[in-house]
Amino acid sequence: MFFTERLGRIASRAAAGLVAVAALASCGGGTYQVQAFVPARILTFGDENSMLIGPQGLKYSINGVSLQTDLIDCTLNPMWTQLLAASYSLVYGQCNPDAVASPGAISFATVNATVDDATTQVAAFLAGDTFNANDMVTIWVGEHDVLNQYLENGVGDQASLIAGMRERGAALANLVNSIAATGAKTILLTIPPMSDSPFAATENERGDFDRATLLGEMSDAFNRSMRSNVVNDGSKIGLVLVDDYVQSAIRNPGGYGLISSPNVTTACQVTVPLPDCRDDTLVTDPVLNSNDPKIYLWADATHLGPSAHTQIGNQAVSRAHSNPF
C-alpha cells in the first residue's frame, strides 16, 4: 500500500521517539509494561478543515497535482487527519488509491459546520453505532461559530459576542467529555486565532474599529472556555494547540519555511476558490517569485495551507502516540 507507506513515513517522524520511550519503559526492570494504544478505527467530526470531498478527495486547503497525469492526487499535500490516520496505517475512503477494503478512517465532518452541527453529526452517528474503547475520535470545529457570529453581529455588543463564544467553547467541551466518557480516545483541536487570518486583515481595511482584535478576542474566548471545561487529564483526550502554532508562525515565518507577513497573504487565486484550488493555480509571491504551496500559511482568507496541516498533523500524531491512552 504505497500511499499509506508514504504518508506513514511522514507521520512516523513525529511518533518514532515516543515509541522508543515506551519501549524503554516496558523493559526497564519494572513490574509493568507499556502498551501503545492502536485504534481499530478513527472517527472524524467537525468542519471542512477535517474532510476530503468526493472521489478526488478534494481539500479545503491546496490540492496537490500529479506531475505525471496533471490530475489532482489526494495523497499530495495531505490534510492533518490523513497524517494522523497514516500513523496507524489507516486511510479515509475519499483518498484510498490502494483500494484498501476496510480503510478504517471515517469522516462525518461537513462544510461550514459549527459546534451545534458537530453535535448533530455525533448524534447521527450514535443513532446507528456506538463509540468504544478501540475508537479514536477527532474533533476540530468552532471557526465558523466565530465567523458566523462576527458577520451577523460584528457592529453590535462586543461583550455579548465574546460571552457567546465562551458558551460555544463550553458546549464543545461538554460534547467531547461525553465522547470520552464512553472510553473512546479523542484528539481535540483549538481553532486558529482569526485575528491573524487574511480575512481579518481585509475586515480591518474598513477603518471603523479594530475588527481584527475583535476576531482575536472571540477566538481566544472560544479556545479558553473549551480548554477550561474539557476533562484534559491525558488519559482520554489529547489537545492539539492550533492557535499556538499559528501565532508562532506569524511571529517567525522563516522558522517554518513561510513567506514574511503570512497572515495577510493567501495562496489561492480568487478565480479558483476552495476546494478546487490546486498547487498549479496559485498566486506567485512577488518577493520570492515562487508559488510553492508550502510557503503560504493560508490557502485562502480563512483556511490553512498544507504547511500548517503538516505541522498540525504531526502535533496530532505526537499527542495520539504519547498520551497514556
Image (cartoon, rainbow, N blue to C red):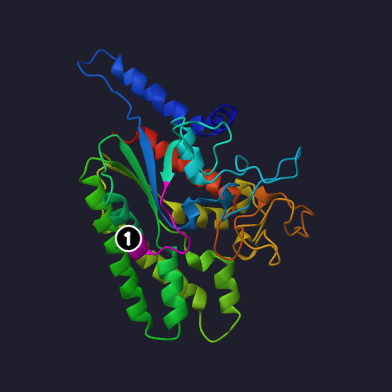
Q: Is residue 110 magenta?
A: yes
Q: In the figure, residue 296 lies in which quadrant?
A: bottom right
**Magenta segment main secondary structure:** loop
Q: Which residues are magenta?
A: 107-117
Query: Is 99 in front, or is 297?
Result: 99
Note whether 120 is above or below 12 in the view shown: below
Q: Is residue 117 left or right of residue 277?
A: left
* Kind of residue at badge 1: Thr
Crowdedness near tag 1: few (<14), some (14–19) or many (≥20) residues, C-alpha within 10 Å: some
Residue at 22% across, 19% down: 32
Residue 14 drawn at (x, y percent): 48, 33
Residue identifier under label 1: 120
Q: Quadrant of the N terminus?
A: top right
Q: Is residue 231 visible?
A: no
Residue 197 drawn at (x, y percent): 55, 65
Residue 321 drawn at (x, y percent): 38, 33
Q: Is residue 35 left or right of residue 191?
A: left
Q: Secondary structure at mark 1?
A: helix
Query: Is 323 in front, or is 255?
Result: 323
Residue at 49% across, 55% down: 49
Q: Is residue 117 visible?
A: yes
Q: Is residue 188 magenta?
A: no
